[in-house]
Image (spheres, coloured by chain):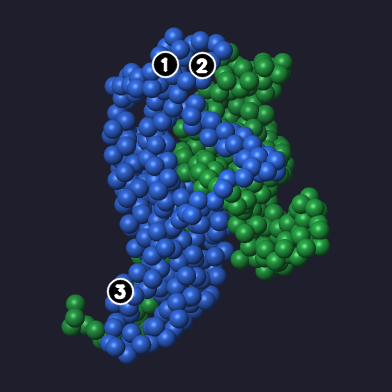
Amino acid sequence: MSAKTKSGTFNRSFEPWLYLLPFIFGIVVFTLYPVINVVLISFKEGYRLLTGAFDSIGVENYLKVISDPYFINGIKNTAIYVITVVPIATAISLFFANLLNQKIRGIAIFHTAYFLPLVTSATAVGLVWKLMFNGQFGVINYLLGIFNIGPFEWITDPRMNIYTLIIYGIWNMIPFTTILLLSGLQNIDPLYYTAAKVDGASSSKMFFRITVPLLAPTIGLTCVVNTISASKVYGELFPLFNGRPGIARNLYTVVFYIYEKFYVDWDLGSAAAASIILFLIIFVFTMIQLQIQKRWKYY
Amino acid sequence: MKKRFHFSPKKLLVYLCLIIGAIIMVFPFYWMLVSALKTTAEFNSYPPTWVPENWFNMENFKTAFSKAPFVTYFMNSVIVTISCVIVTGFTTILAAFAFSRLKFKGRDVIFSLLLSLMMVPFEMLVITNYETVTRLQMGDSLIVLIIPFISSIFYTYILRNFFLSIPDSLYYSARIDGASNWKYLWRIMVPIAKPSLVTIMLLNAISCWNSFLWTLLVINSDDFRTLPIGLYAFMTEGGSDFKLQMAASTFTVLPMIILFLFTRKYIVNGVARGGIKG
């Protein structure tokens, strides 16, 4: 070890690449090549796994996917999910973040409680939600029953499935969103509040005149990040509906469609085409995110 | 140092809201545990009972463990998570160092290309990666669960930013003292970057432990299932006894909850930088 103390013993311009080698290897083989390959597969008709043989090149896969009722169903459900879950979860998280930003005793315990779902397996948590959503003996119907609401067949009635997914999705999104908003709140200079207090502003006035405008970039950023992750909703479906997209195959999402085309039907061309469409949707939102970050110089 | 605890009406309201919110967020975990501890009679009673009669009723755990090899699943999860954290940590440290400290041709071009790759969802890469590991005949082994994740652009990005904040003068004085780049990295930079490194490793551990889609695709045999996939298989194959599912679920989430209780600050800090996959 000690014999080679100077890096001059081997070529200086070569050294950085030795440091990069393992990292670049992983990226090239498992990210860069797959990105290029999935674009190619999406244009190959009748692509066969492993042999790599295909019948012809064209846009047939794309035409097949966009005319597939299951894919259209997937786009529709994903859109509904994003449009409902993101704003509701953001509003609740904004409220929670303000609560957690208070300087009061025992706040650490509350932080722990609110952020717990971040670290837990979606499969395990999905299973307990399925139990709570049970139509006959589920605790959610019991609690709603106290207020004379329901009972609902959350799992077994196809019409209820999307609400089940949305409620679970909101709960799931809250911890991450709350953390982002809370760190945004903590970046606001306390001097603003001190000045406002001197001028005799009420706390609701301070919230809407100081907190909300100064937090706007964080809220915008949070919404875009959540929109991107909500566009990829699928994992929640496995435990809730026994591995099916809704109890009667009524609740496809874009990624669930990709998963099924790939792993159940082995129609790789369609799966690739659908994932390119997903990427384009995400790309648009990512561009919006970058614009927000640039304009507000956040981070 | 004891301050008098004064309850103003406003403070009371804040506490009330905090408690209601905490109940909403924690209740599913409470319900998971409580359901796992209930007997059949308790479980079937309606309205539901809020606490189990016997907090030490291990029947459901015993039955679940006899029906599926959860200890094997647990060991697989531990092996995969630890290996993944070590291997990815290693590639990340080296790459972050090269991108922040070393100078080479095309460094910034390569780095911005990497950043643009970050927006590609993993779901899009799955088809080709599946092909790759099958072609290399790595199917059905624990290595397959680690290998696609050996490099992380996001973690490298976080660590590189931290490395950039370490003053140049430290580097030059170390070099003058005769330290090689390698030595400088491991003796000086890594110890300084410990908080960032711990955060990265914790985030990585969480996402490895909970990894679902990839494991579901590549693992067929019971011997190599991790806890989330074992749990999912137990649900689809092992019947629909909710009590047993809840016992298995509790066993799956417990290690990460314990980890979280001890390292909350690091994890929350990392998440605030956008570092967890949805």
Could you tell me how far apart the alpha carbons at marks 3 and 2 are, in whole angstroms?
A: 57 Å
Seen in the picture, residue B203 relative to B77 is either above or below; the reply is below
Quarter of the image that includes the C terminus of chain A: bottom right
Colour green belongs to chain: A
| Residue occupied by mark 3 | B187
Which chain does blue denote in the image? Answer: B
- Name the residue carrying label 1: B53
Looking at the rendered structure, the kind of residue marked 3 is: Arg
Q: Is residue A269 above or below residue B186?
A: above
Q: Earlier in the sequence, mark 3 or mark 1?
A: 1
Q: Callout 2, which amino acid?
A: Thr
Q: Quadrant of the N terminus of chain A?
A: bottom left
Residue B186 visible from this viewpoint = yes
Q: Which residue is most to the bottom?
A: B176
The chain identifier of the residue carrying mark 3 reads: B
The answer to whether tags 3 and 2 share a subunit is yes
Q: Nearer the viewer, mark 3 or mark 2?
A: 2
| A150, B80: nearer the viewer | A150
Q: Determine whether label 3 and label 1 are within 8 Å by CB.
A: no
Q: Which mark is residue B49?
A: 2
Q: Secondary structure at mark 1?
A: loop
Q: CA separation, marks 3 and 1?
A: 56 Å
